[in-house]
Image (spheres, coloured by chain):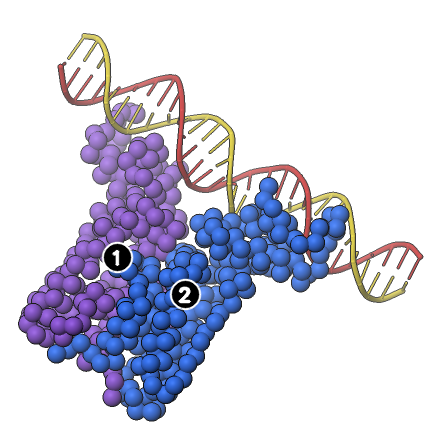
Chain colours: A blue, B purple, C red, D yellow
Amino acid sequence: MVTPIAASPRRGRGRRSHAQVRADILEAAGRLLLTEGMGAFTIERVAAMAGASKMTIYKWWPSKGSLALEGYATTIGSTLTVPDTGDIERDLTTQLLTYVHLLRDTRAGRVLAELIGAAQTDAQLAAVLHHTYSGPRRAVGLAALRAAQQRGQIRPDADPDVLIDQLWGACLYRQMMPDQPLTDDFARAVVRNVLHGVRE
Amino acid sequence: MVTPIAASPRRGRGRRSHAQVRADILEAAGRLLLTEGMGAFTIERVAAMAGASKMTIYKWWPSKGSLALEGYATTIGSTLTVPDTGDIERDLTTQLLTYVHLLRDTRAGRVLAELIGAAQTDAQLAAVLHHTYSGPRRAVGLAALRAAQQRGQIRPDADPDVLIDQLWGACLYRQMMPDQPLTDDFARAVVRNVLHGVRE
DNA sequence: CCACGTTGTGTACGGACCGTCCACTCGGGC
DNA sequence: GCCCGAGTGGACGGTCCGTACACAACGTGG
């Protein structure tokens, strides 16, 4: 038996409201995910923690992955900082440092890698992940890059989408395939390289 | 019941040699992995396909992931092409195009993403993956980049390790987080950007 | 004010795998 | 030719999946 999270003692075997049950389940999902990671994330355990029935969960979430991601999004929230100082190098560095900090220093970073990993064998999760996470993230970066192109700070023939992959993708790669440490200097170097080039 | 792969009919319930059993298991593992993917990869199914006992597998491989990866490596083999024309841009492009081709056009690409995904929740697999895959891969790229630095084609203050992540990492990111297609032009643009920079 | 439909709960089920254990049986080394 | 190491079949308890069914509260319409 796992300790239920319901703050107020469950009334008899009564019935919580639609919204309340949903909220309890999502909170339990987020908590389990952040404390024990995706490897221990199980629908049965979420149900037990939320004091809910598995049936209820299966009724509202199509897959384990989608529940996990929604629980993640609910408890973490997405803090997409969008600095715009007019200096693209400065702004990109700020954004990437924030991203590196998230990946390296918070539980959310670990969990994000695990979610992306799980999405490789869970098409459901992959789709939700695209809508919820990578889509918005990419959009924010694209906006900054396109604005810089308008201002003439970035060559007009450069494809902003490619840059996104070279910036954020590089960081995520270090997180998921860690032969090398993910440091602040790495983030700065990534921005510098792609802006100025390394060719002699 | 799954069709056993043993070419020669199993003799009674006799015993194959150490090496033979190992080989049969690895072949079965590789085949299962490439045909059905990591989602369907199960020790019990590998054992059934190889006509072996689960015990034997557990005796030699510490985790499901390590068996999967070794099966993968055995049947795919690693074809690390190392062109060296003296022109770093040309060589990097060649290497990356080969990589993109592997990721996009072969089953091995899909499986590789699934393996890296699984490694996010399987420390065993992560370790083996580092030794078997990402380490060597990085070493090959590093060699090319360092040589180019020696030749004065790349700025001496640029960190080759960072470049690896921006080149290969970017491609892998598109494979695992596919909001955008992984094309040949993408590979070429990635190399171009990081060598020449996109700053106006 | 009371029956009723809606909605969630408890409980149980068959199935798939996991990881482990034991009894048996070959084969090759002595 | 005998014996021990190594592999096999089979079975076990455990966890989790996904689903089914009967029942209990709630709130709403008659």
What amino acid type should be assigned to the residue bearing mark 2?
Leu
Instruction: Locate residue B91: give its quadrant.
Output: bottom left
The quarter holding residue A181 reads bottom left
Q: How many marks?
A: 2
Q: Residue B138 placed where, x, y %?
A: 20, 60
x then y, percent, for residue B127 = 28, 49
Residue B32 sits above or below residue D27 on the image? above
At mark 2, the secondary structure is: helix
- B6 relative to D29 in the view: left or right: left
Q: Position of residue C18 (x, y in %)?
A: 41, 39
The answer to whether tags 2 and 1 share a subunit is: yes
* Nearest to N terminus: mark 2 or mark 1: 2
| Circle number at residue A179 | 1
Q: In the image, what residue occupies the spot 38% across and 75% down?
A: A95
**Marks 2 and 1, how far apart in space?**
19 Å
Q: Is residue A139 above or below residue A44?
A: below
As rendered, which of B191 and A110 lies closer to the eye? A110
